[in-house]
Image (cartoon, helix red, strand yellow):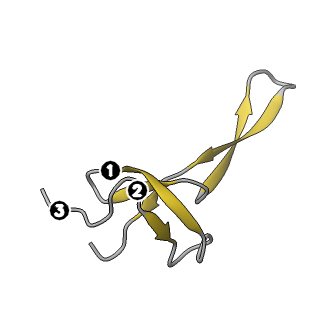
Amino acid sequence: MAMNKIRKGDEVIVRAGKDKGRRGTVLQVFDDGRVLARAVSFKSDAERHAATECRVVTYQADLERIGK
């Protein structure tokens, strides 16, 4: 198991991707190097319950750590 330099509660800055430059606080660190940061990396998905009813759901996605 490798030692992570990023810990829960740290403030991070996104260096690449569509959220480049955004800041967020780490909520969770996964074993494979991904992190979940508050207010960064949102994704949307369509949720369908019936043939006529559909809504868009937005949820927070994790970030992949680069340069492990």
Please state, as top left, top right, bottom left or bottom right, where the N terminus lies in the image. bottom left
Per the model, the C-alpha gap separating discs 2 and 3 is 14 Å
Q: Secondary structure at mark 3?
A: loop
The amino acid on which the numbered mark 3 sits, given as a three-letter code, is Met
Q: Which residue is mark 3?
A: 3
The amino acid on which the numbered mark 1 sits, given as a three-letter code, is Phe
Q: Residue furthest right?
A: 52
Examine the rendered structure and indicate whether residue 51 appears above or below residue 19. above
Nearer the N terminus, badge 2 or badge 3?
A: 3
Q: Nearer the viewer, mark 3 or mark 1?
A: 3
Counting other residues with Cα less than 10 Å from the Cα at mark 2, is it few (<14), some (14-19), or many (20 or more)? many
Q: Position of residue 43 (x, y in %)?
A: 63, 52
Q: Position of residue 19 (x, y in %)?
A: 61, 70
Could you tell whether 18 is left or right of 33 in the image?
right
Q: Which mark is residue 42?
A: none
Please state, as top left, top right, bottom left or bottom right, where the C terminus lies in the image. bottom left
Q: Which residue is mark 2?
A: 35
The reply to whether the C-beta atoms of the residues labelled 1 and 2 are less than 8 Å apart is: yes
Could you tell whether 1 is left or right of 18 in the image?
left
- Residue drawn at x 24%, y 62% is 4
The reply to whether the C-beta atoms of the residues labelled 3 and 1 are less than 8 Å apart is: no
The amino acid on which the numbered mark 2 sits, given as a three-letter code, is Val
Nearer the N terminus, badge 3 or badge 1?
A: 3
Q: Secondary structure at mark 2?
A: strand
- Residue drawn at x 62%, y 44% is 59
Examine the rendered structure and indicate whether residue 64 appears above or below residue 14. above
Q: Which residue is mark 1?
A: 30
